[in-house]
Amino acid sequence: MVPANDRERDELSCRLEQAVQQALELRQTLSGLFGPDLRGVLDVVLIELGRRIAALR
């Protein structure tokens, strides 16, 4: 998704940052319940979210 203007960029950035917080909370919640495979998947999600946030700035 490519934002057309500053307002859309801000909205997308906010949504991505919310997704990061949710992924971090999920990773913490599941840390003791599942092995490293699921944590690895969540790490990949966090890395991709970070890349997209960085691309907006």
Image (cartoon, grey):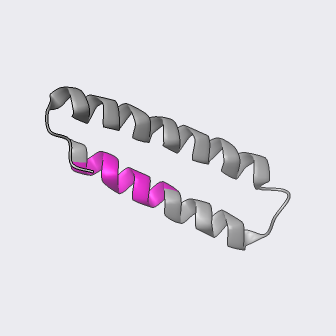
Single out the residue that lies furthest toward the left. 5
Q: What residue is shown at x 79% (from left), y 69% (from top)?
A: 35
Single out the residue that lies furthest toward the bottom. 37
| Residue 53 among those drawn in magenta | yes
Task: Residue 54: give x, y in percent of width and height.
Answer: 28, 48
Task: Residue 46: give x, y in percent of width and height.
Answer: 50, 55
| Residue 17 among those drawn in magenta | no
Name the image quarter holding residue 40. bottom right
Describe residue 15's horizontal placement relative to residue 56 as left or right: right
Most common SS among magenta residues = helix
Q: Which residues are magenta?
A: 46-55
Nearer to us in this view, 3 or 30: 3
Q: What residue is shown at x 33% (from left), y 36% (from top)?
A: 13
Figure label count = 0
Describe residue 29's horizontal placement relative to residue 55 as left or right: right
Describe residue 39's horizontal placement relative to residue 7 as left or right: right
* Quadrant of the snapshot with the C terminus: top left
Name the image quarter holding residue 33. bottom right
Q: Is residue 11 above or below residue 37?
A: above
Q: Is residue 56 above or below residue 32?
A: above
Q: Is residue 5 above or below residue 28?
A: above
Q: What residue is shown at x 41% (from left), y 41% (from top)?
A: 16
Q: What residue is shown at x 16% (from left), y 29% (from top)?
A: 6
Task: Residue 8: give x, y in percent of width and height.
Answer: 24, 32
